[in-house]
Amino acid sequence: MNPMISASIMCADIMNLEPHLRDLEKSCCDYIHVDIMDGTFVPNYTLGTELIRRLHQDTRIPLDIHLMVEKPEEKLNYFELLPQDVVSVHVESTKNIQKIIETIRKKGARVCVALNPATPLCYLDYLYDEIDMILIMTVNPGFSGQKLIPATLKKIEDLRAHLDAIEKSGILIEVDGNVSFENAPVMARAGADVFVAGSSSIYWQGSSFTDNVSRLRNVVLA
Ligand code: DX5
Ligand code: ZN
C-alpha cells in the first residue's frame, strides 16, 4: 500500500489559504484533512461547513472530513460530499453508527470510522463489511500540538494483524495526532496507510511546506 498524506488544514495559516491550496497541489498531498469540532464532543472549535464548500470549489484534492461532533447524523446534512471524499465518524459520538455509515454511502462518499485512543478495536467488530478506512486517533482529539499516546502504536499493529486475518487488508488505516517525522515511520511499520500531517510535520515552521512534505514521504517510505 502506498502511504498517503492527509494535510491537516487546521494547522495552515487561515489568512492565506488560497495560495496554500496551490502548495498542497504542487506537493501532491492525497487528502485535505478538515477537522470539524463542535465544542461538545471535543472541547475546541475549528473549521466548518463553509470551508468545505469553498474547498470543493477551489481544489480537486479529495477532502478527508473528520467529524468530532455530537449527533453527527444531523450535521451530515449541512454539507455536500463528492465521491472522492472520505468522512470519518467517531463510534463514541453516536448510538447508531450503522445508520450514519449508510447516510455517508448514500451521499456518495467513502466511509471511515474513528476511534479515540482508549476505545477498543472491538467496536469495529460488526462494521468491517461496511467501511473503507479506520481512523486511529493517536492523541485525544481536539487540539493540535499534543504528544503521541504510545499505547496507540500497539493498537495500529493489532488492527493491521486483524485486518489481514479476516481478509480485509484493503481497509485503510489512518493515523491522526503527532504524526511527526520521528513517529510516522514507526506508525508505518505498525501498519498505517494514511498519515494526517499537521504541526508536527508538514506545517512545522522550521522548513518550507514542500520540503516538509517530501521529508515526510521519505521517512515513511524508508
Ligand atoms: C485533531 C487534529 C490534530 C492535528 C494534527 O484532532 O486532527 O490531530 O491536526 O496535527 P499535530 O501534528 O499538531 O498533532
Ligand atoms: Zn483530525
Image (spheres, rainbow, N blue to C red):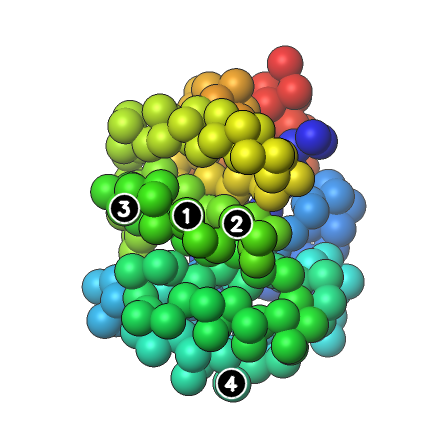
Q: Say which amino acid is labelled 1.
A: Asp
Is there CB contact under 8 Å for labels 2 and 1?
yes
Name above or below for residue 59 compared with residue 181: below
Q: Where is residue 173 in the image (x, y as percent from the top left)?
A: 53, 39
The residue that disc 4 covers is 78
The residue that disc 3 covers is 119
Tell me which residue sits at (50%, 79%) in the image: 76
Disc 1/disc 3 C-alpha distance (Å) = 13 Å
Please give the label number shown on residue 128: 2
Tell me which residue sits at (30%, 56%) in the image: 142
> Alpha-carbon neighbours of circle 3 within 10 Å: few (<14), some, or many (≥20)?
some
Q: Which of marks 4 and 2 is nearer the N terminus?
A: 4
> Alpha-carbon neighbours of circle 2 within 10 Å: few (<14), some, or many (≥20)?
some
Q: In this view, does 164 lie to the left or right of 1?
A: left
> Alpha-carbon neighbours of circle 4 within 10 Å: few (<14), some, or many (≥20)?
few
| Mark 1 close to ligand 2, CB under 8 Å | no
Q: Say which amino acid is labelled 3.
A: Thr
Residue 17 falls in image quadrant: bottom right
* The residue positioned farthest toward the top in the image shown: 222
Please tell me how many numbered marks the rendered image carries. Answer: 4
Q: Which of marks 4 and 3 is nearer the N terminus?
A: 4
Disc 4/disc 3 C-alpha distance (Å) = 28 Å
Tell me which residue sits at (48%, 31%) in the image: 162
Q: Which one is in front in this view, the residue at disc 4 or the one at disc 3?
A: 3
Please give the label number shown on residue 169: none
The kind of secondary structure element at disc 3 is: loop
The residue that disc 1 covers is 125
Disc 1/disc 4 C-alpha distance (Å) = 29 Å
Q: Say which amino acid is labelled 4.
A: Tyr
The kind of secondary structure element at disc 2 is: loop
Q: Is residue 200 left or right of residue 50?
A: left
The kind of secondary structure element at disc 1 is: loop
